[in-house]
Amino acid sequence: MAWLERRQIGLYLAAIAAGGSVGVVVPGTSLLEVAIYPVLGLLLYATFLGVPFASVGAALRDVRFLLAVLVVNFVFVPAVAFGLSRFVAGEPALLFGVLLVLLTPCIDYVIVFSGLAGGASDRLLAAAPLLMVTQVLLLPVYLWLILGRDGVAAVDVGPFVEAFVVLIVIPLAAAAGTQALAARYRGGRRLQAGVLGAMVPLMMATLFVVVASQAAAVRSQAAQLVILLPLYAGYLLLATALGWFVGTSFGLDVASRRAVVFSGATRNSLVVLPLALALPPELALAPVVVVTQTLVELIGMVVLVRLVPALVPHAVRERPGT
């Protein structure tokens, strides 16, 4: 397992490359889409299993961190999303897809990637319900401000509720039960150790399934989607800088600042994809727009796992009271 952890970044890149190759070459890989929630749920179960639940309670009382995450995601990011969306303002499907994905902060694998970079996973876990509720309430508002009444009419909260239950509630309950077993029984401790030792393979499986299931759809629309690559890459750069700025301005500790950076940079693409699939025919390209963001973001996350610890090093002197 130590060998896997030392080489995890290279292995994640290999999983992304393999998923892309298989998705393009092998027919029918889009059917792997049904496996996204199960593999992501297993990954999050393993992630939650490594977070002491006592620390989650303390994280809920960390008002400065919660405010920093809200400011990044619902004050600064909407302004960035609006600015970047101007580049596709003449294409309704591209515009709707870009706004849909950039306006919704991630609540699932952000916890995993932040933890890999030494971020405060427990605080992000505690913030997940707040982020979910806030984005459900504010997404229609932002779409109304930018797109008008038609943008609001297309929003359905169903996919948000389903994703929260499948990706947060169920894995969280399973992890809590496993931790309780581990505290009392040797078998529980073995199970916990085995699951935690499988983190790298689970992450590789998740990356492979997500990329392989969507690669063919992206390739088929590549000519129309090329403009999105610099747009999404630009978002990652801007959101990373904003996360660093807000985390520093709020005087957060190193782990919390790293978590704020990841919260701003990652988007809720896997949750809003079902919503995009339910859009009317004239917006049929929107799901592929969302998927393209997923592919760019996954590569960006692998880079940020290495970059963020350098951007927010432990050597930085922390302010009093952090």
Image (spheres, helix red, strand yellow):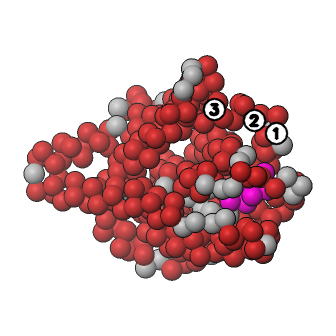
Left/right of residue 166 with respect to residue 289 in the rendered view: left
As shown in the figure, which amino acid type bears the numbered disc 3?
Ala
Tell me which segment is drawn in magenta: 94-101
User: Residue at (38%, 74%) from the top-left corner?
Assistant: 58
Q: State the mark number for residue 215.
A: 3
Q: Which residue is mark 2?
A: 221
* Residue 13, horizontal then vertical, whole percent: 58, 31
**Closer to the camera, 2 or 195?**
195
Quadrant for residue 18, please give it: top right
Q: Nearer the viewer, residue 184 or 156?
A: 156
- Give how far apart the Cα atoms at labels 2 and 1 are: 6 Å
In the rendered image of this protein, does residue 193 appear above or below residue 9?
below
Near mark 1 (Cα within 10 A), the count class, few <14, some 14-19 or many ≥20, is some
The residue where tag 1 is placed is 224
- Give the side of residue 274 with respect to residue 101, left or right: left
Q: Hey, which residue is sitting farthest left in the picture?
A: 185
